[in-house]
Amino acid sequence: MEKKTFKQRIKEKPSLKQAVYRLIMHPVKTRPNWWIRLFDFIYLKRGKGSVIYRSVRKDLPPFNHFFLGKYSVVEDFSCLNNAVGDLTIGDYTRVGLRNTIIGPVNIGNHVNLAQNVTVTGLNHNYQDVKKMIDEQGVNTQPVVIEDDVWVGANSVILPGVTLGKHCVVAAGSVVSHSVPSYSICAGCPAKVIKTYDFGKRWKKQYPVIINSENSYAIYLIKVIVTPTETLYLCSIRIELISHNFIT
Protein backbone atom coordinates (compact mmCIF):
# COMPACT_ATOMS: atom_id res chain seq x y z
CA MET A 1 0.00 0.00 0.00
CA GLU A 2 1.41 3.36 -1.03
CA LYS A 3 2.14 5.69 1.84
CA LYS A 4 0.41 9.06 1.49
CA THR A 5 2.31 12.27 1.94
CA PHE A 6 1.24 14.98 4.38
CA LYS A 7 0.18 17.15 1.43
CA GLN A 8 -2.00 14.39 0.01
CA ARG A 9 -3.68 13.85 3.37
CA ILE A 10 -4.55 17.55 3.60
CA LYS A 11 -6.06 17.54 0.11
CA GLU A 12 -8.32 14.61 0.99
CA LYS A 13 -9.89 16.45 3.93
CA PRO A 14 -11.72 19.63 2.77
CA SER A 15 -12.07 21.13 6.24
CA LEU A 16 -8.37 20.66 7.02
CA LYS A 17 -7.44 21.94 3.56
CA GLN A 18 -9.49 25.09 4.12
CA ALA A 19 -7.92 25.68 7.54
CA VAL A 20 -4.38 25.31 6.20
CA TYR A 21 -5.18 27.56 3.24
CA ARG A 22 -6.54 30.24 5.59
CA LEU A 23 -3.40 30.00 7.71
CA ILE A 24 -1.22 30.58 4.64
CA MET A 25 -3.28 32.97 2.48
CA HIS A 26 -4.89 36.28 3.39
CA PRO A 27 -8.66 36.05 2.65
CA VAL A 28 -8.90 39.52 1.09
CA LYS A 29 -5.45 40.23 -0.30
CA THR A 30 -5.22 36.72 -1.86
CA ARG A 31 -1.52 36.57 -1.13
CA PRO A 32 0.53 34.80 1.56
CA ASN A 33 0.16 36.23 5.05
CA TRP A 34 3.08 38.30 6.30
CA TRP A 35 4.26 35.59 8.69
CA ILE A 36 4.53 33.17 5.76
CA ARG A 37 6.43 35.66 3.61
CA LEU A 38 9.01 36.05 6.38
CA PHE A 39 10.21 32.53 5.55
CA ASP A 40 10.04 32.66 1.77
CA PHE A 41 13.83 32.39 1.59
CA ILE A 42 13.37 28.80 2.79
CA TYR A 43 10.77 27.53 0.33
CA LEU A 44 11.44 29.66 -2.78
CA LYS A 45 14.03 27.82 -4.85
CA ARG A 46 16.52 30.00 -6.71
CA GLY A 47 19.62 29.32 -8.78
CA LYS A 48 23.06 30.87 -8.44
CA GLY A 49 23.23 34.57 -9.27
CA SER A 50 19.47 34.99 -9.74
CA VAL A 51 17.93 38.37 -8.88
CA ILE A 52 14.45 39.36 -7.73
CA TYR A 53 14.27 43.11 -7.12
CA ARG A 54 12.76 44.32 -3.84
CA SER A 55 9.71 45.96 -5.44
CA VAL A 56 8.57 42.66 -7.02
CA ARG A 57 5.29 41.39 -5.57
CA LYS A 58 5.80 37.74 -4.63
CA ASP A 59 2.40 36.08 -4.34
CA LEU A 60 4.15 32.76 -3.87
CA PRO A 61 2.63 30.45 -1.25
CA PRO A 62 4.63 27.35 -0.30
CA PHE A 63 1.99 24.82 -1.35
CA ASN A 64 2.92 25.20 -5.06
CA HIS A 65 6.33 24.99 -6.70
CA PHE A 66 8.43 28.04 -7.57
CA PHE A 67 11.88 28.05 -9.14
CA LEU A 68 14.03 30.81 -10.64
CA GLY A 69 17.05 29.58 -12.59
CA LYS A 70 20.66 30.70 -12.36
CA TYR A 71 21.51 34.24 -13.45
CA SER A 72 17.87 35.00 -14.22
CA VAL A 73 16.41 38.40 -13.31
CA VAL A 74 12.91 39.60 -12.34
CA GLU A 75 12.79 43.36 -12.82
CA ASP A 76 11.08 45.98 -10.62
CA PHE A 77 7.31 46.21 -10.10
CA SER A 78 6.61 42.76 -11.52
CA CYS A 79 4.21 40.25 -9.95
CA LEU A 80 4.91 36.53 -9.58
CA ASN A 81 1.98 34.32 -8.61
CA ASN A 82 1.88 30.54 -8.15
CA ALA A 83 -1.28 30.39 -6.03
CA VAL A 84 -3.17 28.25 -8.57
CA GLY A 85 -0.27 26.55 -10.36
CA ASP A 86 3.47 25.95 -10.37
CA LEU A 87 5.79 28.66 -11.69
CA THR A 88 9.17 27.73 -13.15
CA ILE A 89 11.61 30.16 -14.78
CA GLY A 90 14.76 28.78 -16.40
CA ASP A 91 18.37 29.96 -16.55
CA TYR A 92 19.59 33.28 -18.04
CA THR A 93 16.04 34.54 -18.43
CA ARG A 94 14.92 38.14 -17.92
CA VAL A 95 11.44 39.14 -16.76
CA GLY A 96 11.05 42.81 -17.64
CA LEU A 97 9.60 45.77 -15.75
CA ARG A 98 5.97 45.51 -14.63
CA ASN A 99 5.43 41.95 -15.85
CA THR A 100 2.67 39.76 -14.39
CA ILE A 101 3.18 36.00 -14.42
CA ILE A 102 0.44 33.76 -13.02
CA GLY A 103 0.97 30.00 -12.91
CA PRO A 104 0.81 27.34 -14.08
CA VAL A 105 3.64 28.65 -16.26
CA ASN A 106 6.92 27.06 -17.37
CA ILE A 107 9.45 29.46 -18.89
CA GLY A 108 12.63 28.09 -20.44
CA ASN A 109 16.23 29.28 -20.66
CA HIS A 110 17.46 32.48 -22.35
CA VAL A 111 13.95 33.93 -22.57
CA ASN A 112 13.42 37.69 -22.70
CA LEU A 113 10.11 39.22 -21.63
CA ALA A 114 9.98 42.95 -22.34
CA GLN A 115 8.02 45.54 -20.32
CA ASN A 116 4.37 45.19 -19.25
CA VAL A 117 4.01 41.59 -20.41
CA THR A 118 1.29 39.37 -18.93
CA VAL A 119 1.67 35.59 -18.95
CA THR A 120 -1.21 33.75 -17.32
CA GLY A 121 -2.30 30.15 -17.01
CA LEU A 122 -5.44 31.22 -15.14
CA ASN A 123 -8.90 32.07 -16.41
CA HIS A 124 -12.13 32.92 -14.57
CA ASN A 125 -15.27 30.83 -14.96
CA TYR A 126 -18.25 32.86 -16.15
CA GLN A 127 -20.69 30.39 -17.75
CA ASP A 128 -23.39 30.41 -15.03
CA VAL A 129 -25.25 33.71 -15.54
CA LYS A 130 -27.13 33.24 -12.27
CA LYS A 131 -23.93 33.60 -10.27
CA MET A 132 -21.44 36.41 -9.92
CA ILE A 133 -18.29 35.74 -11.90
CA ASP A 134 -16.13 36.03 -8.79
CA GLU A 135 -18.22 33.25 -7.18
CA GLN A 136 -17.61 30.71 -9.95
CA GLY A 137 -13.96 29.98 -9.31
CA VAL A 138 -11.19 29.65 -11.85
CA ASN A 139 -9.75 27.16 -14.29
CA THR A 140 -6.17 26.68 -15.39
CA GLN A 141 -4.27 25.62 -18.50
CA PRO A 142 -0.46 25.54 -18.39
CA VAL A 143 1.53 28.05 -20.43
CA VAL A 144 4.86 26.85 -21.82
CA ILE A 145 7.51 29.23 -23.16
CA GLU A 146 10.37 27.24 -24.60
CA ASP A 147 14.03 28.26 -24.76
CA ASP A 148 15.31 31.34 -26.61
CA VAL A 149 12.00 33.23 -26.94
CA TRP A 150 11.53 37.00 -27.13
CA VAL A 151 8.18 38.51 -26.12
CA GLY A 152 7.70 42.18 -27.02
CA ALA A 153 6.36 44.88 -24.70
CA ASN A 154 2.67 45.03 -23.74
CA SER A 155 1.96 41.50 -24.98
CA VAL A 156 -0.44 39.04 -23.37
CA ILE A 157 0.09 35.27 -23.38
CA LEU A 158 -3.17 33.48 -22.55
CA PRO A 159 -3.82 30.08 -20.87
CA GLY A 160 -2.92 26.92 -22.76
CA VAL A 161 -0.43 28.60 -25.12
CA THR A 162 2.94 27.12 -26.03
CA LEU A 163 5.57 29.41 -27.55
CA GLY A 164 8.05 27.27 -29.46
CA LYS A 165 11.81 27.58 -29.41
CA HIS A 166 13.34 30.76 -30.89
CA CYS A 167 10.03 32.40 -31.67
CA VAL A 168 9.24 36.10 -31.41
CA VAL A 169 6.04 37.76 -30.23
CA ALA A 170 5.65 41.28 -31.59
CA ALA A 171 4.90 44.12 -29.17
CA GLY A 172 1.25 44.52 -28.23
CA SER A 173 0.22 41.03 -29.34
CA VAL A 174 -2.48 38.94 -27.66
CA VAL A 175 -1.49 35.29 -28.09
CA SER A 176 -4.43 32.92 -27.72
CA HIS A 177 -3.10 29.97 -29.75
CA SER A 178 0.23 28.18 -29.69
CA VAL A 179 3.08 29.43 -31.88
CA PRO A 180 5.49 27.00 -33.60
CA SER A 181 9.24 27.13 -33.15
CA TYR A 182 11.29 29.51 -35.33
CA SER A 183 8.41 31.80 -36.18
CA ILE A 184 7.22 35.36 -35.57
CA CYS A 185 3.66 36.22 -34.56
CA ALA A 186 1.88 39.56 -34.26
CA GLY A 187 -1.56 41.04 -33.80
CA CYS A 188 -4.71 40.69 -31.72
CA PRO A 189 -5.32 37.81 -31.83
CA ALA A 190 -1.74 36.97 -32.81
CA LYS A 191 -1.08 35.17 -36.08
CA VAL A 192 2.13 33.76 -37.53
CA ILE A 193 3.58 36.28 -40.00
CA LYS A 194 7.05 34.82 -40.61
CA THR A 195 8.73 31.44 -40.33
CA TYR A 196 12.33 30.34 -40.74
CA ASP A 197 12.82 27.73 -43.48
CA PHE A 198 16.40 26.79 -42.53
CA GLY A 199 17.47 28.00 -45.95
CA LYS A 200 19.03 30.86 -44.00
CA ARG A 201 16.10 33.21 -44.44
CA TRP A 202 12.83 34.24 -42.84
CA LYS A 203 9.77 33.93 -45.06
CA LYS A 204 6.68 36.06 -44.79
CA GLN A 205 3.46 34.09 -44.62
CA TYR A 206 0.09 35.21 -45.90
CA PRO A 207 -2.53 32.89 -44.43
CA VAL A 208 -5.74 32.18 -46.28
CA ILE A 209 -8.65 32.06 -43.84
CA ILE A 210 -10.13 28.58 -43.43
CA ASN A 211 -12.63 27.02 -41.04
CA SER A 212 -10.77 26.86 -37.75
CA GLU A 213 -12.02 23.31 -37.13
CA ASN A 214 -9.93 22.04 -40.05
CA SER A 215 -6.30 21.08 -39.65
CA TYR A 216 -5.42 22.56 -43.05
CA ALA A 217 -3.44 25.75 -43.35
CA ILE A 218 -2.93 27.44 -46.72
CA TYR A 219 -0.25 30.08 -47.06
CA LEU A 220 0.83 32.45 -49.78
CA ILE A 221 4.58 32.67 -49.60
CA LYS A 222 6.25 35.75 -51.07
CA VAL A 223 9.56 35.01 -52.79
CA ILE A 224 11.70 37.72 -54.37
CA VAL A 225 12.80 36.40 -57.78
CA THR A 226 14.53 39.47 -59.23
CA PRO A 227 14.73 43.09 -58.10
CA THR A 228 11.76 43.86 -60.37
CA GLU A 229 9.74 40.67 -60.22
CA THR A 230 7.75 39.12 -57.40
CA LEU A 231 6.38 35.60 -57.43
CA TYR A 232 3.64 34.36 -55.14
CA LEU A 233 3.58 30.65 -54.53
CA CYS A 234 0.60 28.93 -52.97
CA SER A 235 1.47 26.02 -50.74
CA ILE A 236 -0.72 23.78 -48.67
CA ARG A 237 0.53 22.57 -45.33
CA ILE A 238 -1.44 19.79 -43.72
CA GLU A 239 -0.72 19.38 -40.04
CA LEU A 240 -2.19 17.50 -37.16
CA ILE A 241 -1.89 20.10 -34.47
CA SER A 242 -3.44 20.47 -31.07
CA HIS A 243 -3.82 24.22 -31.51
CA ASN A 244 -4.89 26.04 -34.69
CA PHE A 245 -2.84 29.03 -35.72
CA ILE A 246 -5.39 30.14 -38.33
CA THR A 247 -8.80 31.47 -37.37
Image (cartoon, helix red, strand yellow):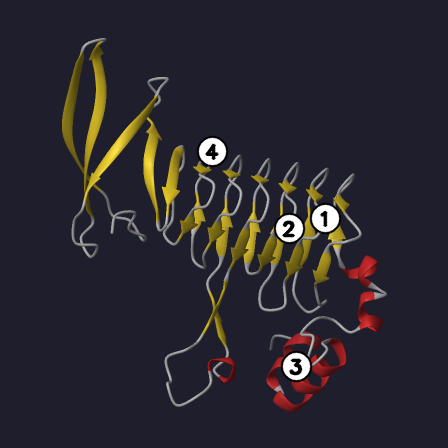
Q: Which mark is residue 76?
A: 1
Q: Which mark is residue 9?
A: 3
Local secondary structure at mark 2: loop
Q: Which mark is residue 166?
A: 4
> Looking at numbered disc 1 in the image, what kind of residue is underneath it?
Asp
Local secondary structure at mark 3: helix
Give the distance between the C-alpha atoms of the residues marked 2 and 1, in whole angstroms: 7 Å
Local secondary structure at mark 4: loop
Number of other residues with Cα within 10 Å of mark 2, as a class: few under 14, some 14 to 19, many 20 or more: many
Can residue 230 be spotted in the picture?
A: yes
Residue 243 x/y as whole percent: 32, 52
The vertical placement of 3 against 161, above or below, is below
Q: Which one is earlier in the sequence, the residue at label 4 or at label 2? A: 2
* Quadrant the N terminus occupies: bottom right
The mark closer to the camera, 4 or 3, is 4
Q: In which image quadrant can residue 233 be found?
A: top left
Q: Are marks 2 and 1 in contact (CB under 8 Å)?
A: yes
Q: Which one is earlier in the sequence, the residue at label 4 or at label 3? A: 3
**Along the viewing direction, whichever of 46 and 204 lies nearer the viewer:** 204
Residue 101 x/y as whole percent: 59, 56
Give the distance between the C-alpha atoms of the residues marked 4 and 2, in whole angstroms: 23 Å
**Along the viewing direction, whichever of 223 and 104 lies nearer the viewer:** 223
The vertical placement of 46 against 41, above or below, is above
Q: In which image quadrant can residue 58 be found?
A: bottom right
The mark closer to the camera, 3 or 2, is 2
The vertical placement of 29 against 112, above or below, is below
Residue 131 x/y as whole percent: 43, 88
Provide the residue designation for mark 2: 98
Residue 15 x/y as whole percent: 65, 91
